[in-house]
Amino acid sequence: MTESPYAFEMRGIVKRFPGVLANDRVDFTCRVGEVHALLGENGAGKSTLMNVLAGLYRPEAGEIFVGDQRVSFRSPQDAIAHGIGMIHQHFMLVTSHSVAENMVLGLDRPRFFLDLPRVEEQVTALGAQYSLSVNPRARIWELSVGEQQRVEVLKMLFRGAKVLIMDEPTAVLTPQEVEALFHTLRDMTKRGHTIVFISHKLDEVLAIADRVTVLRRGKVTAAGVPAKGATKAQLAKLMVGRDILFLLEKKKAQPGEAVLTVERLCADNDRGLPALREVSLQVRAGEILGIAGVAGNGQRELAEVLTGLHRATRGSMMLGNVTLGSHANWLEIGQQLAHIPEDRAAVGSVPGLSVAENLILKRFNRPPFAVGWSINAAAVRQNALRLVEDYKIATPTVEMPVRMLSGGNLQKVILARETSEHPKLMVAVHPTRGLDVGAIEAIHRLLIEHRDRGAAILLISEELDELISLADRIAVIYEGRIVGEMPAEGADIHAIGLMMAGTKVEA
Amino acid sequence: MNLPGTAYRLRIETRSDNPGWMGLVSSVLGVVLALIVGGFVLRAAGANDPIVTYREIFKEGFGTPADWQAGVSALLTSSDCPKGQLCFGPLSDTLVKASPILLTGLACIVAFRMKLWNIGADGQMFLGAWAATGVAVFLLPKTTDRAVMLGAMALAGILAGLAYGAIPGFLKARLNINEIITTLMLNYVAYKWVEFFVVVGPWSIGDFESTGRFPTPATWPRLTEYARQIPITAGLTAHPGILLGIGAAVLLAWILYRSRWGYEIRVIGNNPNAARYAGISLGRNILLVMALSGALAGLAGMNEVAALRELNGRLQRGYGFTGVIVAWLAKLNPLAAIFVAFLFGGLLVGTKLIQPQGIASMLQGVILFVVVGTELLFRYRVRLEKAEPVVAVAAETGDVP
């Protein structure tokens, strides 16, 4: 294996973005027939490096060799012409077109006449060869996320890719789908393909990769170390530069009386289709209830109904002994709720307003901020200075617009705003998504702190590791139903995975 | 293949930093560039030396330093302006012109802050002018106290504009009907409405297409009325309308930056999702802001008829659209709008005698164009950088498997 020739070599790649050195003289080489994991935290420069290889970005310095030839790609077409294709996190498929139509999209041949039946035959043959069966006539929107990913892989194979770059391919898959993907990848390497596997998940990397290259802040910290023999702790240290506690230290939960009781709650999504089907759950004071599930199974609607942004069609919600009805109007019942929304930039904050102004978003209508018709600027500033210090928000001034802040600091602004008043109930949706390890740790600690002072917390997350280490109980949601619930301690990841995939999974 | 020498190419990047002074720079740059572009147009239109033309426009719009000096010394000595001319004539005319522009500019600012594109300030102003006229000529007796009369007219103008602005606001809030279309179309309804009353309709006196001269209490007092006490004011038409505009600007600035409502407006304008999340009502604010926008434009209408002293078929159109430009040039800052409106007033007064007559509108258009354009330049950075030597890549695709 180690003596097979290079599939490609990247030497001294430098790529800069405004204010960020994304790749700092990075060397990265892959040998034919291996799965090479590119590991690193969010923002370490993995995707940037691979976008350079795939012809999407042009580096400021550095050389790329494919075989013996030095190349410079101006576009993804140039890269694919040299057998290098990339599958992005967000699929590049036309959802209203068929699988076969997507195959030929962007190809400059055939120039005039499109022989779709022939393309369909080829897709079927290719699918059989690599055990990636997809109906070539199906429209993309009819396919599951896992199937769409297969279409992306087929598309690259169809175009003659020998090197396949996959950017966090498992992020949207169930554990079972991940296994199927790994199977395909191994199959492909046996046929002489080379896979670059971008990830920040250590377990997966160790499970699939032959060799691992680790990036930290744009620099290589480990170049092509064999995965066999590497340990999680070792790789994590290379990735983040210090030892990370994998198990969160927390005391056993001391649940008190029920804070939130939801019974047979039903709701439709924005398109008017049922999203929640008779969801019943209870969160007690001093405990964290985790909701596990693959994205799009009703988590968003659940959070929105609970926080009053969306109306339920049936069912009841109770806060302590107070019935909320189908529309949880928190302002009306004068109760506080902490809501850490899924999308901190698009929902949770006002990008053009200052840190201080964002910190009063939920309280601007109440004293001490509201005085008559006006807003007390001194109180706003005082509040901001205190929270910036308490929550260690890194910002030059409190007058700085929050769009200038990093993701971690923005999330801290939101957490500071939502939790500083010690609310009884917190709804946190993907609170650590896209953050670096340091920020994740800080946010986990904060949630535990609030649990210990007696808050009832509903945590919605796709990261099973996060749920298991943070939550006290885990409920699994699938197609709008709670399909199972268990204590987090000693929970079986495989069992949760099966539930997340519904009942249709054969495993 | 190495290219001989070094090639350079342009790159466009997003700016991560965007300091506050950039707004000012882009506005000033907009005006300067517009003057340069306008210079070429003036050349093409037959002016030999655009600089001379601009100097003339400035003199007509603001006066000359010599005039101002003479005016100040005349003021200090309580004497007439020398040589029988109006030392502060151009400035006075400019202030008269600036007041409706300032008010419509403020109307646009408050709506634009919430990304409500109210381009119907013209129509709202016409309705305001109409309502103020109704109060002055047909409702209150001619002998009403001046302050009461003007106050009632202002109230009528505000209410009419408010109602007229609330129509597209309601349609937007309730039915999500595009306010650009409705406000634009309602302009024409307002023009015809006024035309009906004063040209063919019940308010016209004979064939004059006018309501006739307002009773004195219904008119703005002009500076010239004080010529007996202060000789220098003789012949000056400046009136308190500009103070009304400045007061409105200060009030609007307070609303936007210091009040709870203004906070809501800024949150919605910046991120409506976050507003929903914070429990701020979008529909209510759309309605209220459109009503306030209309009210400011309606006040501009009252101001205009109180200055013209009559309502006739020739009430000038277009102040509402100039307001759009003022709002943009002021970067939606109400206090900056005071200054911008003054400049635009000068431009309108100064170009009155310039032929062809479209010069003022042309300059306004170019200014808006350049300001919007430079804003783009400030949001992105254009950089010249060395291109790396490029290896030609054969774009031959491999055979389809």
Image (spheres, coloured by chain):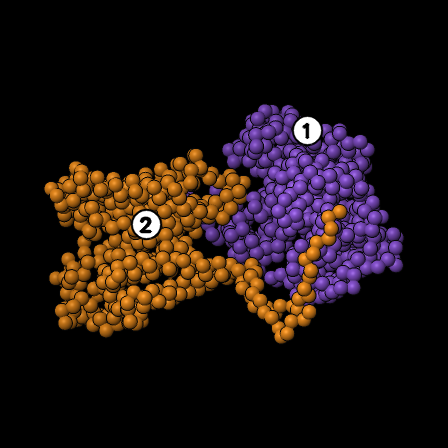
Q: In 3D space, how far apart are the residues under numbered discs 2 and 1 (Cα atoms)?
A: 55 Å
Q: In the image, is residue A2 above or below residue B209?
A: below
Residue A215 position by quadrant: bottom right
Q: What quarter of the picture does the C terminus of chain A occupy? A: top right
**What color does chain A have in the rendering?**
purple
Q: Residue at x 25, y 39 (%)?
A: B193
> For mark 2, does the 10 Å Cα neighbourhood hold few (<14), some (14 to 19), or many (20 or more) residues?
many
B24 sits left or right of A14 in the view: left
Question: In front of the other: label 2 or label 1?
Answer: 2
Residue A468 rendering spot, x and y as whole percentages = 76, 40
Q: Which mark is residue B320?
A: 2
In the rendered image, which residue does mark 1 sit on?
A481
**What color does chain B have in the rendering?**
orange
- In the rendered image, residues at marks 2 and 1 fall on the same chain: no
Q: In the image, is residue A389 above or below residue A149?
A: below
Q: Residue at x 75, y 47 (%)?
A: B401
**Relative depth, front residue between A345 and B388:** B388
The amino acid type, in three-letter code, at marker 1 is Arg
